[in-house]
Amino acid sequence: MTTSVSAPWMVSLHGGHSSAYCDHADSTLQELLDAAVERGMRVFGMTEHAPRGEKRLLFPEEVSMGWDVRKIGRMFEEYAQESRERVAEYADRIQLLRGFEIEVAPGRRYPELMQKLRERHQFDYIVGSVHFVEDELFDYNVESLKKVSQKVGGLEKLGVRYYRILAEMVEALRPEVVGHMDVIRKYAEPLGAVDTPPIREAAMEALEAVRAAGAILDVNTAPYRRGHDVPYPAPWIVEAARDMGIPFCFGDDSHAVADVGAGIEQARAYLLDHQVDAITCLMRRDDGAIDREVIPLQ
């Protein structure tokens, strides 16, 4: 991270996963927020993972740590309270937004449960992500991707199913931000391509759902930290979304101090290289309502 003076486009709408509330995070929420201030972030969205209300949907690390559904629910309640307090505490230094990231595709009751969670705690927005296909976590490691791929009949069928679930999630929940749209490629390289014609067709249908919902696509910088050349989403998705008029915003997907703001300068250059010259950020008005602001990248 090299930016020392705050640029208007130094924003993240997807990040702020912290060790008190997330099993795979390494820094406290205060440490992440202090880093965001230090690194010149203009807007920083706190988007902790929503609780998954069934034992079978727990992450492997959560199980190994002895966490259960009840504990995770309590932790999320604590996050909702702390995040509210931090908005006021940091108001003179940075604009903080309160959100949460969903990760289980909607079943019959899931959209209702997530909306109730939002309303009860008066969150500013939702990041809509998909980490599960057929109730199986697919982006934990290569083996998890193999397992789910075999369950659904192959990698191509998994890719198609993933994007269809993503579209269902967007249609049901209408999140303000769609998280790391092509995270399906995270561990796919050793197994094969996840941009075949059937997968691309399903992805285009998902983009139509994103456009219809008026959602913002998360340009997620986490792949840079893993040595990849491009963030999420890949160029073919960026170009299609651009041509459809779908807006973008940055997300650092931070789980540790080192992640805060990391890769945003690269992501800015990436968007400019693909003829995207502005991002769209959520901003809090003086009366507390959330608006959108288009921010030029030049």
Image (tube, rainbow, N blue to C red):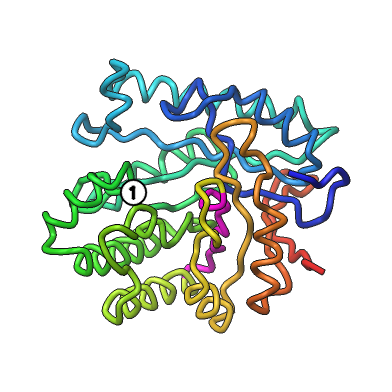
Question: In the rendered image of this protein, does residue 91 appear above or below residue 283?
Answer: above
Q: Residue at x 64, y 34 (%)?
A: 258
Find out whether residue 217 is within the magenta segment: yes
Residue 162 counted in the magenta span: no
Report whether 248 appears left or right of 39: left
The local crowd at label 1, few if under 14, some if 14 to 19, many if 20 or more residues have their Cα within 10 Å, is some
Q: For the point 56% across and 52% down, which residue is it?
A: 224
Question: Is 257 left, or right, of 174 in this rendering?
Answer: right
Residue at 27% in and 32% down: 58
| Residue 41 image point, x, y percent | 76, 43
Instruction: Say which quarter of the image contains residue 144.
Output: top left
Considering the image in quadrants, where does the C terminus appear? Answer: bottom right
Q: Which is more toward the observer, 106 or 57?
A: 57
Q: Amino acid at mark 1?
A: His
* Depth check, front residue: 208 or 237: 237
Q: Position of residue 297 (x, y in %)?
A: 77, 66
Q: Is residue 274 above or below residue 214?
A: below
Which residue is situated farthest in the right direction here?
A: 5
Give the magenta part as a residue range. Answer: 213-224
Residue positioned 27% across, 30% down in the render: 60
Q: Which residue is mark 1?
A: 131
Task: Tell me if residue 272 comes above or below residue 180 in the rendering.
Answer: below
Q: Quadrant of the N terminus?
A: top right
Q: What is the x, y in percent for residue 230?
A: 55, 62
- Looking at the rendered structure, the secondary structure element under dot 1 is loop
Residue 112, percent from left and from top: 34, 47
